[in-house]
Amino acid sequence: MLKINEHYSGLKESYLFTEIGHRVARFTAEHPERSVIRMGIGDVTLPLCPAVTQAMAGAVAEMGQAATFHGYGPEQGYGFLREKICAYYADMGVTLSPEEVFVSDGAKSDLGNMLDLFAEDNRVLIPDPVYPAYVDTNRMAGRPVLYINATEENRFLPLPDGDTQGDIIYICSPNNPTGAVYDRAGLQKWVDFARERGAVIFFDAAYESFISDPTLPRSIYQIPGAADCAIEFCSLSKTAGFTGTRCGYTVVPAGLVRGGMSLNKMWLRRQTTKFNGVSYVVQRGAEAVFTPEGQTQVRANIDIYRRNAAIITEALTRLGIWHIGGVNSPYIWLKCPGGLSSWDYFDRLLTGAGIVGTPGAGFGNNGEGFFRLTAFSSTDNTRAAMKRLEDMDE
Ligand code: PLP
């Protein structure tokens, strides 16, 4: 008799963005004269940079000629891209070999797929609030989830203490949704904790390129001991506008061993069995991100988002609204004024100012009473939205 994975029936409906869509649709139907500025999405708004599109166009042309056509590529990614990624890490003071780098179609897939390597009765430790995929990928496998509280008191950067438990530990820094970023001392505490207990850290560095403060770590491998306990997931989605193009990379250190097994070898085995690699055209585009020309261009785009984030944080500061993030992150996390709930503030912003943000409650229980705004918009729209916010408050 066929048995399905019953854990799916226990998943909570992910209604956050659907509900936002419904409320915005209702508002625009009732007020067709009002314009709405969207500051809630986590998707980029700027296009791919010219270095990337030129490299991809060149690769498309190669694919159309018998002499330069590429069929199946290496599952782990082409050497030309993995070497560039190693050089990128070397600039941060991190030495990696190309065998430790796995090119993927994005961080989301790898974050979920990596769980193949771990038994289902491991305890998983996830900060609350956080990027929702961590919880659901574990619930799908029936794995018990423990939460660690990220709160206003710890500035949304929880640290382990004597009571903390967990075999697989998720850390997202810079964080989605809070924009909070761990410093070296904070990450060192997590690395020490994981090493003492033989736990493994899943370090999500999807927003590392938004870090402008040189004292803050952009990779967990900048922390001594991390290569013994951490897997790092990274993505070109937000760094270089690859949300629709799809390319990321995951680092599994060669020396990371658990239960007598090399996690690097296990992941290679998993990928070569279940994954056939990222397309040649996309990997050539990704390679261009790491050239000097590509870096200049992607940095210019990130600077635009940074400026937008500064416009938002300056307005919130003027209005006396408590907030964090937005400095080394595209996300700004604010405390709903007047003690409003996340959804009540959503409605107030929508009806009062025509601004769409994301209710913090959608990212976990501790997100209630908080709200996420993003810098992924045009500078004109960001300015207009903040003017509306300030006018609303007068
Ligand atoms: N990790 C975090 C924290 C994210 O916010 C996102 C996307 O929003 C991802 C991973 C997914 O990245 P990718 O587009 O590479 O799958």
Image: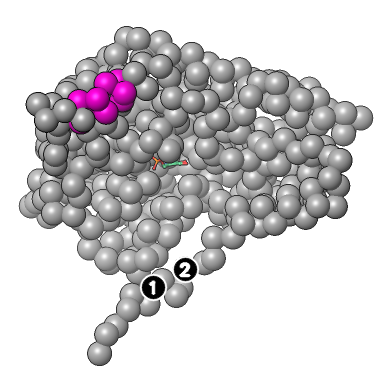
Between 15 and 213, the one lying in front of the other is 15
Question: Quadrant holding ligand 1?
Answer: top left
Q: Amino acid at mark 2?
A: Leu
**In the image: residue 61, left or right of residue 40:** left
Q: Say which element carries label 1.
A: helix
Q: Say which element carries label 2.
A: loop
Q: Amino acid at mark 1?
A: His
Between 357 and 252, the one lying in front of the other is 357
For the C terminus, the image quarter is top right
At 36% across and 16% down in the image, what residue appears? 51
On residue 370, the disc is none
Identify residue for label 1: 7
**Quarter occupied by residue 376:** top right
Residue with the most extreme front position: 65
Up-down relation of residue 90 to residue 155 (above or below): above
Q: Residues within 10 Å of mark 2 (few under 14, many from 20)?
A: some
Is any atom of residue 173 visible in this view? Answer: no
Identify residue for label 2: 11
At 27% across and 67% down in the image, what residue appears? 121
Residue with the most extreme bottom position: 1
The part of the chain drawn in magenta is 55-63
- In x, y percent, where is residue 212? 47, 17
